[in-house]
Image (tube, rainbow, N blue to C red):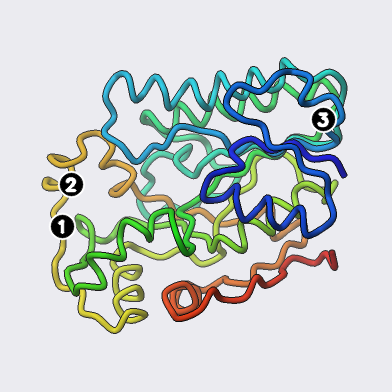
Amino acid sequence: MNIALTGGSGFIGRPLARRLLADGHSLHLLGRNWPPESLADAEAIVNLAGEPVAQRWTRAAKQRIRASRVEGTRRLVAALPRCPAVLVSASAVGIYGSRGAEVLTESSPPGEGFLAEVCGEWERAAAAAEPLGLRVVSLRIGVVLGRGGGALARMLPAFRMGAGGRLGSGRQWMSWLHLDDLVELIRFAILEPALSGPVNATAPNPVTNREFTRELAAALHRPAIFPVPALALKALFGEMASILLDSQRALPQAALAAGFLFQYPELAPALRLITGPGPGPAGRCGRWPW
């Protein structure tokens, strides 16, 4: 299959590109200023491009975050010369806003806040490809855990020194996902015709921040006794602190219903694998044999 990929140089895009090439697919990586003819032979498109949200949300930063996702996806859809089979486009669990302990599935309504608004526009921009005949999957991605980047890369130095701790009250729910499972879920979304619309890209067992802190400290054999007050986070990061303090308890109902199997459904084994010695297995999961 000929697959076009945006965001192929990122934390998620790099292992995804390796996996798709290993499967024997033909892969076209789209840079920031790709020409429309880049999509001429695409049979599937995976859209992962987006300005990092882990930065202070100045007015200019907010504009970049919104434009890179919403305008970038609109440009992608507008450039389609014909109808590939599927568009798999990133979104985020931030679409739900902060919802306490409420269980969130793909049928839950959007929440409030900057990220919720951006994600809503992002998904609507992707859904504009549906009238063209494409199957559109919007992956509402949670906190992705893996080696060499993502959220853990920022957490590990403090935790390895025994200076880690819960964030704020620690009662906020974290919807997380092992990087290997996310790569497999994207592959599954490309080829599974029953999967369409919003899909929570999260492990089946979300945890509170307090639980996450305890499990990460245990995996590293370190104490975690230095909580970070919410006021300190807000003073340090401004409005962006909401991604650390907001609560989303999202369940992958659509993926499970379509038959996807998670290799890492529980947090503790996932963290032990990521933080332990060696690269860890590139395990294949999902029901597909390829």
Q: Which residue is rendered at x = 84% and y = 24% of the image?
A: 40
Residue matched to label 1: 228
The front one of 32 and 131 is 32
Q: Are marks 3 and 1 in contact (CB under 8 Å)?
A: no
Amino acid of disc 3: Leu
- Would you call the spot at circle 1 few (<14 residues within 10 Å), some (14-19), or many (20 or more)? some
- Would you call the spot at circle 3 few (<14 residues within 10 Å), some (14-19), or many (20 or more)? some
Q: Which residue is rendered at x = 32% and y = 62% of the image?
A: 209
Q: Secondary structure at mark 1?
A: loop
- Distance of label 3 from label 1 (alpha carbons): 45 Å
Residue matched to label 3: 134
Q: Quadrant of residue 212?
A: bottom left
The numbered disc on residue 233 is: 2
Percent of width and height locating residue 63 = 39, 19
Q: Which residue is rendered at x = 64% and y = 46% of the image?
A: 199
Q: Earlier in the sequence, mark 2 or mark 1?
A: 1
Q: Secondary structure at mark 3?
A: loop
In the rendered image, which quarter contains the C terminus?
bottom right
Amino acid of disc 1: Val
Q: Is residue 246 left or right of residue 27?
A: left
Q: Is residue 11 left or right of residue 77?
A: left
Q: Are marks 2 and 1 in contact (CB under 8 Å)?
A: yes
In the rendered image, which quarter contains the N terminus?
top right
Q: Earlier in the sequence, mark 3 or mark 2?
A: 3
The front one of 210 and 268 is 268
Amino acid of disc 2: Leu
Q: Secondary structure at mark 2?
A: helix
- Distance of label 2 from label 1 (alpha carbons): 7 Å
Percent of width and height locating residue 142 = 49, 51
**Looking at the image, residue 88 lies above or below residue 12:** above
The numbered disc on residue 7 is: none
